[in-house]
Amino acid sequence: MKNIIIAGLLLSSGLLSAQVDRSQKPAPAQAKKININDSQIFTTANGITVILSEDHKLPRVTFELSMGSSPRIEGDKAGLAEMAGSLIMSGTANRTKDQLDKEIDYIGATLSADKSSILLSCLSKHTDKGLTLMSDVLLNANFPESEFERIKKQNESGLMSTKSDAGTMAKNATVKVNFPNHPYGEVMTEATLNAIKREDVMNFYKANFTPKGSYLVVVGDITRAQTEAMVNKYFASWNGGPLYTNPTNDGNFSKGNRVIFVKKPGAVQSVVYVTFPIKMRTGDKNQLALNVLNGILGGGGFGTRLMQNLREDKAYTYGCYSSMNITEDGSWMSAGGNFRNAVTDSAITQILKEFEKITNELVTDEELNLTKSAMAGNFARSLERPSTIARFALNIKKYGLPTDYYQTYLQKLEAVSKEDVLTMAQQYFTSKNCNIIVVGNEEIIENLKKFDADGKIEMLDAFGNEVKEVKKADIPKEQVIERYIYTVTQTKNQKELAKKLKKIKSYERVLDMTSAAIPIPLKMTDYWVASVTEAQKMEGQGMVFQKSYYDGKTGFTYSMQTGKKELTADEMESKRKSSGLFPEMGYAKNGTNYELTGIENVDGKDYYVIKITEKDAQSFDYFNTSTFLKERSVAIRKNGEETVETSTTLGDYKVVSGIMFPHAISLSVGPMSLVGKVSKMVVNGKIDLKDFKD
Amino acid sequence: MKKIVLTGLLLSTGLAVFSQKKIEYKEYDLPNGIHVILHQEPSTPIVAVSVLYHVGSKNENPDRTGFAHFFEHLLFEGSENIGRGEYSQLVEKNGGALNANTSQDRTFYYELLPSNQLELGLWLESERMLHAKVDIKGIETQRSVVKEEKRQRVDNQPYGSFFTEMFKRVFTNHPYNWAPIGSMEHLDAAQEEDYVNFYKDYYVPSNATLSIAGDIDIEQTKKWIDKYFATMPSGQAINLYRDFLAQNDADFEKKYGIAKSKFDAKDFMNSKDPAAKKLIATYAAKKIEVKRTKKDDTVLKGVTKDIIYDNIQLPALFMGYKFPEQTSADSYALEMLNEVLSGGSSSRLNKAVVEKKELATFAFSFYYGLEDAGIGIFAAIGASGKTCDEIQAEFDNQIELIKNELISEEEFQKVRNKIENDLVTANASVAGIAENLANNYVYFGSAERTNKLMENYSKVTREDIQRVAKKYLTQDARVILNYLPKEK
């Protein structure tokens, strides 16, 4: 109270109303030394290193148990660890998944797991109960078959959408190129996912989750004595095999620039990453200065060199960034963004120019200070979360950092000079030995040759595997179509074919579809009535989302969002060409623009690829070179500035009324994918089209 | 019987060890009316600087709805000393983060900064309070931004209009009738005088609470607050100063009878001219009475049932009840009632409506306590082939059940655990603490309530929960909205 009165007095006597110069932005005070509590460390008989960081500010506690083993080479089961990680919380020998969820909720706790760690966070008074659940998961996870199948399906859909997701394709190529013969260079494909069995997951879990070499980081409102008691009670009985250590290599350093291209037909933008491995591991004394360099080059915000040059100055892109990934098992640097086709090569030129500049010249004081302030702010704000403190304690122990490393982080950051940044660039950076990853439209390849040291561009597929050169087809396009038609109709010549097709008057096909993105099952029903009438509807939970109809004279599409629309003249023309039981049979006569581009290898199988072009749209049909069955179809159409890719996979061909129809049909549109199984396929049955007659 | 007694005992000992820790703070008023709250938390070198203006959408003219929120956007544009677009840049360049939000009752601004940048934060907020500056381009830009925000959050969002539709029907006699996002036509119609007057009426020291939490030196902080905030004109003198900045010579002299040249442009408050000095003193003595709205004591009459057609695929049901204002003694029991019905996946509504009867894909309820009144909402998005009436029947069953039977001890304890956990988490960050202290001061007249919450909740009995269910879940006086897909 006294203070207030005095302040009031001072004010009224006018003493306090000395002029304030508001036009001057206040200067920052001296950066503070951070108070990070010292951690206590002890080891258990079964090999756990316990790191305790007491913090009694709030009555909460966090237990994070992380495994010490090196990542394993997974080979033909690539993706196994990820798969296991997402299954750990699926239930234990004592609790079903539902029970587990319920008990976690009751104490308001968080319990989560991944491939090499389990994390518990709860109020300190619920520590006992929380650890009961955590240790149950750790010791008794039982990976139920049903959950295994569910997660596998989720992964299948994920892989399908990868094929149309340029960003993921570029990431896959990046790790494959930087890290061959290294756990980082392994990417899950359909083949490796299929090879993963529930036993593999359980074996991985058993091998990887061992107390030997593991770290238990305890942060929060708990004492040393309590921690010891808890660890003894819940983790002493935990046994496991030996720690797996496998020193990894530093990655593959290319000699001269390499251009690596991943085809994305129809793309209007390319995803570009200019990347190379860095010879450094977490905890290196140069790590901080290297991060400052990255902050100046393109590490975030609008002020960086890459952003200023490629966006603000040249307008090649909405954003251009760089990232510095320093880890304990391998490190790499990567810079890039999305660029429209016409400027993809110019963008690469500018990125390389920025690499060169930063290795040759000192950065400015302004750049340096801006980056350091932003980094200091991020660091300081991150400290409020107990998980950050836990990570620091772990890093200090695990990577042998000085014990005051984080205490003095800000001072060390402040001490980084322009000269240090240049030294870092010269030691770790290159503009001449980069891997230039481009995912995009084939038409731009020619312009990229100039960047490649030997002029030979390497081609990878969506998962970063080498694409075999497109081979010239050994037969003409007409023959591919003919062989396909004979195969699916099980006929040998035109006469037999004509006779057989005459008998086919109609079909009705019901496809049951599921998708990770849509919580309800969908049903797609297709009708065809000789010779050109076709109708389709998509429904779910008793509601029709989409319908379409065409009978040669009229046609419409309907969707719940946009309502009913009659087909335009152009759309009618397109339908005319693509309708019929086997539209391929009409190509030669109806003026369809189609060509056989060659033989492509996809996922280990050779396909004849037939390309159909119509105005802005293109589609590619893939016919297996040995069976002649159509197994894949990719349609690309323009939607304004963007292209939309629809990819269909056809499999499980079965004979119905003498015709082979695919019974496994999956769709992927942009990032969404739908997996479908045919539940009804009736030929020459009664067709009721009244749903389409309103 | 023995078991129950034991649980009771455990419960009562449980009371003593509730996890909430006391938040220490200092608070005082500046002579110009700004209320200051300071909380020192040295463990992390960061600081949250916040200003709460006691103005929200309920203070808007009925023909300028959405204005409070729009104004919040405008106040990031700049000031006499901060150029357009620089405001957020200054924060980000200095390692900070910032944001703001507008409710029916208040507008809240904050910066989260490294603690050695506290003075910067204070300067930024004082600039906003003293002489914010907005030009035509800024107004047009923010108008577009707000419209995009509405498209994204309301128009383009399935069921996004339910909030607006519900408030419109539950609050027929109070400005809670419209939602903070308001009407875009009203924003288009806004004139210059609307901006000027809103700033003068509500963005004044006596209507502001400055709440700071983090790694601060209390004495140094007070000095800076004196420098940047205590020097701000008291009473109507701040608006005299604002007119001095905004008006031309002729208009100013016409209004105040003194030429602008008599004042010191560099140091307005210390203008030497005797006439100017006198005028400043006169205006400083004139208090600004902020217009307050009245508590809404009216009760709903009868059942209002409406159908709303929206771009949706599944039908949805929303039921609204008139609940009391947040300061009501019953608010704690109502929060707990809501936890029983809707807290987590094991809650009653989720179990009954979603899992057992599979009537809905999603069902929940909440109590929205405001300054002048409150509302209780039940909501569910239907499962395939289920109707709003079927969902409503089950909601009504659940309501009857909780009115007629005491909840179990176990359920009661779960709710207490959940609330305790939420309260601890609410004070886990300095930004959260600054906001909680300010809210409690402004709405409850006591920052100390921040420390009393668990105590208040622990006084609620199972019988209280049943009592408030009976009192406020009035089946014969409520609003029922059925959302149905638009006709094909």
Image (tube, coloured by chain):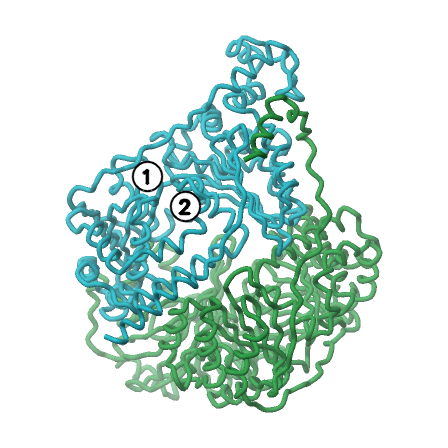
Chain colours: A green, B cyan
- Left/right placement of residue B422 relative to residue B261 reads left
Whichever of labels 1 and 2 marks the residue nearer the N terminus, that label is: 2
Q: Which residue is mark 2?
A: B151
Horizontal side of residue A91 vs B33, given as left or right: left
Q: What's the chain of the residue with tag 1?
A: B
Chain letter for the residue marked with disc 2 in the picture? B
Query: Which quadrant does the N terminus of chain A fall into?
Result: top right
At horizontal 52% and vertical 47% (from top left) the residue drawn is B434
- Which of the 4 image quarters holds residue A683? bottom left
Element carrying mark 1? loop
Closer to us: B223 or A3: A3
Front position in the image: B312 or A126: A126
Residue A655, quarter of picture: bottom left
Q: Amino acid at mark 2?
A: Arg
The numbered dot on residue A148 is none
Q: Could one spot residue B25 in this view of the protein?
A: yes
The amino acid pointed to by label 1 is Asp
* Near-viewer residue (A66 or A458): A66
Are dots 1 and 2 on a single chain?
yes
| Label 1 to label 2: alpha-carbon separation | 29 Å
Residue annotated with mark 1: B372
